[in-house]
Amino acid sequence: MLQMDGKIYFASDFHLGIPDRKQSLERERKLVRWLEMARQDATEIYLMGDLFDFWFEYRHAVPKGYSRLLGKLADITDHGSRFTNHGIPVHLFRGNHDMWAFSYLQEETGIQLHREPEFRTFNGKNFYLAHGDGLGPGDHGYKFIKKVFANPVNQWLFRMIHPDLGISMALFWSRKSRSAALQKEKKEEERNLRLINERIAFHSKEMVMQHPDLDYLIYGHYHYPVETQISGKAVQLVLGDWLTHFTYAVFDGETLSLKEFRE
């Protein structure tokens, strides 16, 4: 097997914007430090969804803030590292909190947006990549809401609300619901593992049956870092989050490892 020149990094569920500006800014700075660390030996970086807790692009306005992150992303995609002289590809898989990311992030920072799960092959290893929301059995209420939010007519209607009002309302409810959920998450790790086993593991097994050459299946969304053997060779990895775990995965060309960022 050919040796890769660098590494591929994966991380998910940063939820910038909550629970308040101070704590969000601390996490943003930590994320920028992680991106700077990753760029030193990265050939690609994958952000697997929910980069922001709320994001909506009006024609002439976006949620304010995140200048450190956006500048770092643009710098990485522009200037690359010692392995590239044309920028490092950075990918964002839209999650359930940033599904309303359209062209702005791509045009201004150079990141590549992905709207559906995708297959990738790195150094002969086959990957399945997805945010993870709405996959597997159950969760019918969310699957319905996701269709409502993805409807272009509903997006147009929300765009008719003035940005000051629309973004303020969305951030208020986003912070309120996420703060409550965060407190529950600290107490319900068993529940998170159960949902991963009931939904994501079920979906992973279906994908492996359809694509028996898969080596790794990588997801975000469930906020709990866990690695599971799905079949003889296929490994499922849920990345965790950057609210409580600060975990990420790195593929060095042969193995995929789950790590914690402590800097």
Image (cartoon, rainbow, N blue to C red):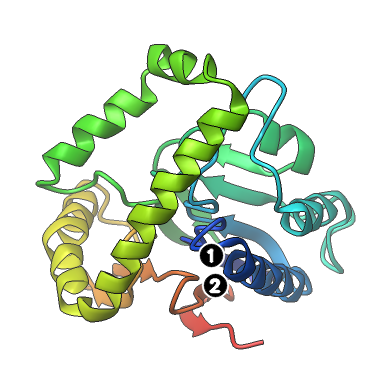
In the rendering, at what x and y percent does residue 151 appear? 36, 19
Q: Is residue 20 shown above or below 113? A: below
Residue at position x 53%, y 19% in the image: 159
From the image, which quarter does the N terminus lie in? Answer: bottom right
Circle 1 Cα neighbour tier, 10 Å, few/some/many (<14 / 14–19 / ≥20): many
Residue 96 in the figure: left or right of residue 19: left
- Nearer-the-camera pick, 54 or 81: 54
Circle 2 Cα neighbour tier, 10 Å, few/some/many (<14 / 14–19 / ≥20): some
For discs 2 and 1, the disc positioned in front in the rendered view: 1
Instruction: Determine the CA span between mark 2 and mark 1.
Output: 8 Å
Q: How many marks?
A: 2
- Nearer-the-camera pick, 85 or 149: 149
Residue at position x 52%, y 65% in the image: 11
In the rendering, at what x and y percent does residue 5 appear? 73, 70
Amino acid on which disc 1 is placed: Phe
Q: Earlier in the sequence, mark 2 or mark 1?
A: 1
From the image, which quarter does the C terminus lie in? Answer: bottom right
Residue at position x 32%, y 52% in the image: 132
Residue 206 in the figure: left or right of residue 181: left
Q: Which mark is residue 10?
A: 1
The quadrant holding residue 127 is bottom left
Secondary structure type for disc 2: strand
Residue 198 in the figure: left or right of residue 55: left
Q: Which mark is residue 150?
A: none
Asked whether the residues under the numbered discs 2 and 1 touch, taking CB atoms below 8 Å apart as contact, a structural biologist would say yes
Q: Is residue 57 among what the camera can see? A: no
- Nearer-the-camera pick, 30 or 231: 30
The residue carrying mark 2 is: 251
In the rendering, at what x and y percent does residue 75 appear? 85, 55
The quadrant holding residue 16 is bottom right
Secondary structure type for disc 1: strand
